[in-house]
Amino acid sequence: MKFLKVSLIVLLAIAFVVGSTGCKKAAPPTPAVEKLKVAFVYVGPHNDGGYSQAHEDGRLYLQQNDPNVETTYSESIPEGAQSEKTFRDYAAAGYKLIFGTSFGFMDAMVNAAKDNPTVKFMHASGYKRSDNLGTYFGRMEQPDYLAGLVAGKMTKTNKIGFVLPFSIPECIREVDSFTVGLREVNPTATVTVVYTNSWYDPAKEGDAAKSLLNKGCDVIASGVDSPAPLDEAFKAGKYGIGYDMDMAAGMKTADEAKSVLTSRIWHWGPYYLKVAKAVEDGTWTSGDYWGGMADGIVDIAPISSAVPQSVIDYVNTRKQLILDGKYTPFDGPMINQKGETVVPAGTTMSDADQLNLQWFVQGVIGEIPKSGS
């Protein structure tokens, strides 16, 4: 009888446990983390071989290094009303971080940001900001200066051609800093400027390079978004200096790659990753980022084997001074085309003056039209 009682108790206990387990609700599945949707808007084709492709490489870097983002892009978007529609469409589609990569997108981004306060907008090279609109760029004048050193040592005619898109401050800074480097090693050399009035127009860019070659320039520096000026320089048996990305790497033949003495390049990826992480963790704030070679956002590409090692060594020495914060291309004395000292010895041009720069240094042949992008 005692055995039956114990057995009955055990059976009742098992029944209770089984019944309790059967009634227990399964834990709800862990909700998937919502990815941050990030959009990029380019003024040129994503594979232009220059500026827009450098940003596209940055987008891909972000996508590959942050599993919590979903990215997309729009390419060849004209500045003005169409770009504003593009920014608004992305905001309406749930994109919470939007990068506009051209100076001429500025007012369109200001308008779109005002009406979409929960979206973070980032504008490359601009100067208008709000609570949800920040600006960013790099001190490209640093590698511009180093490239000028190379050009000054490699020219035989002492005539350098520079193909520029517009006369806005960022473009004037390129020419001035390049010329500072050029004349540091070759005081009689000059830089002749030709404008295309377009960020991306390979035909115009090629024609501009031809006009400079016809004037006796034997090194063509590009400030535009395609490799077209460098192609024309190679065809003429002359040298080129690239912009935006390592343009030697994209050339069709080894000889043409060798003709590209170096390039001034962007590394956008790590910065884009940093911004996305800040948005994800809620620490993003509006501001103005302006990094240099020490930050890794800009650099000079590997120098061609056509350049003597002694020149490469000198460039590397000057680069190290920049990295150490001991030199900038805008250290005085700086003298303008009229022979006037604008930046006295012992001083450095302020960031504010650099951001509004509208004069050429001595050694530049060309004027600054009072129009821009």
Image (spheres, rainbow, N blue to C red):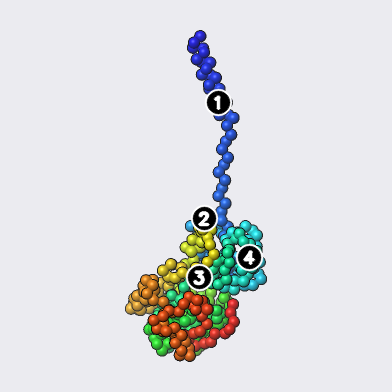
Residue indicated by mark 3:
137
Estimate the x, y position of residue 11 in percent, counting from the top left. Answer: 53, 19
Residue 362 seen in the figure:
no
Badge 3: residue crowd in 10 Å (few <14, some 14–19, many ≥20): many
The residue that mark 2 highlights is 281
- Residue drawn at 42 percent across, 73 percent down: 300
Residue that appears at 39% across and 86% down: 186
The secondary element bearing badge 4 is classed as helix
Q: Residue at x 38, y 72 (%)?
A: 325
Q: Secondary structure at mark 2?
A: helix
| Viewer-proximal residue among 278 and 98 | 278
Q: Which residue is mark 1?
A: 18
Residue sitting farthest toward the top: 1
Amino acid tagged 3 = Phe
Q: Quick check: marks 3 and 4 in contact, CB under 8 Å? A: no
* Amino acid type, label 1: Val
Determine the CA span between mark 1 and mark 3: 66 Å
The numbered disc on residue 114 is 4
Would you place residue 22 above or below residue 262 in this image? above
Q: Are marks 4 and 2 in contact (CB under 8 Å)?
A: no
Quarter-of-image position of residue 207: bottom right
Q: Residues within 10 Å of mark 1 (few under 14, many from 20)?
A: few
Along the polypeptide, which appears first: circle 4 or circle 1?
1
Q: Nearer the viewer, mark 3 or mark 4?
A: 4
